[in-house]
Image: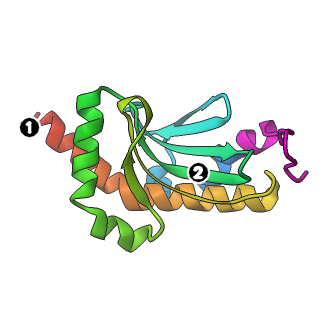
């Protein structure tokens, strides 16, 4: 169903199918993510929900946002912003359309959007592929970030 002004596209089937589609696009060692749908957003993480990958359909704009979000304390979010700012050349090598910015409520995000007139099978496949691309590119860096932040065990 195409998105029309003032109308919402049915999103439940899209969000129900998304986790298995993302898992199928990842190597076995990265399929163990946790996921949770919060309203019109699907969040994926590897044990640290304050830093998660996100897929969010902006129905009014007919666009899907995918990215890595920092939604913890202001200090954590700022540290994540600085960590990834210093690595944007590397990030852009794998995610050429990614943008990094501080965001609402002191959060930060590394994200991109792409057009999706509706939440059809094509949008599902494109979203899953992009979420997987973000995980493949950013998860090793995110693990380094957490390791640096946590210090030696």
Pinpoint residue 108: horizontal percent, then vertical percent: 37, 41
- The residue segment tinted magenta is 1-17
Pinpoint residue 151: horizontal percent, then vertical percent: 10, 37
Disc number placed over residue 65 in the picture, else none: 2
Q: Is residue 36 left or right of residue 39?
A: left
Pinpoint residue 115: horizontal percent, then vertical percent: 69, 61
The local crowd at label 2, few if under 14, some if 14 to 19, many if 20 or more residues have their Cα within 10 Å, is: some
Q: Is residue 132 left or right of residue 60?
A: left
The local crowd at label 1, few if under 14, some if 14 to 19, many if 20 or more residues have their Cα within 10 Å, is: few
Residue behind mark 1: 152
Please, what secondary structure does the residue beneath circle 1 have? loop
Q: Is residue 55 left or right of residue 91?
A: right
Earlier residue among tags 2 and 1: 2
91 in relation to 30, above or below: below
| Residue 5 part of the magenta segment | yes
Identify the residue at horizontal 44%, vertical 67% (top origin). Answer: 95
Q: Which residue is farthest right?
A: 1
Q: Nearer the viewer, residue 14 or 109?
A: 109
Occupied quadrant, residue 130: bottom right
Q: CA distance from mark 2 to mark 1?
A: 35 Å
How did the renderer colour the structure?
rainbow
Q: Nearer the viewer, residue 134 or 81?
A: 81
2 in relation to 44, above or below: below
Occupied quadrant, residue 17: top right
| Residue 68 part of the magenta segment | no
Identify the residue at horizontal 8%, vertical 37% (top origin). Answer: 152
Mark nearer the viewer, 2 or 1: 2
Can residue 26 be seen here?
A: no
Identify the residue at horizontal 68%, vertical 34% (top origin). Answer: 40
């Amino acid at each position: 169903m195409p998105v029309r002004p003032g109308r919402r596209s049915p999103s439940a089937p899209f969000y129900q199918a998304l986790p298995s589609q993302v898992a199928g696009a990842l190597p076995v060692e990265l399929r163990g993510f946790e996921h949770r749908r919060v309203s019109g957003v699907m969040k994926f993480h590897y044990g640290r929900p304050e830093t998660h990958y996100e897929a969010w359909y902006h129905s009014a704009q007919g666009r899907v946002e995918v990215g890595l979000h920092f939604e913890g304390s202001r200090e954590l979010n700022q540290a994540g912003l600085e960590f990834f700012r210093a690595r944007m050349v590397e990030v852009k090598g794998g995610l050429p359309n990614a943008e990094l910015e501080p965001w609402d409520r002191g959060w930060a995000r590394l994200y991109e959007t792409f057009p999706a007139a509706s939440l059809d099978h094509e949008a599902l496949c494109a979203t899953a592929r992009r979420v997987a691309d973000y995980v493949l590119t950013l998860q090793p860096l995110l693990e380094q970030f957490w390791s640096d932040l946590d210090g030696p065990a």
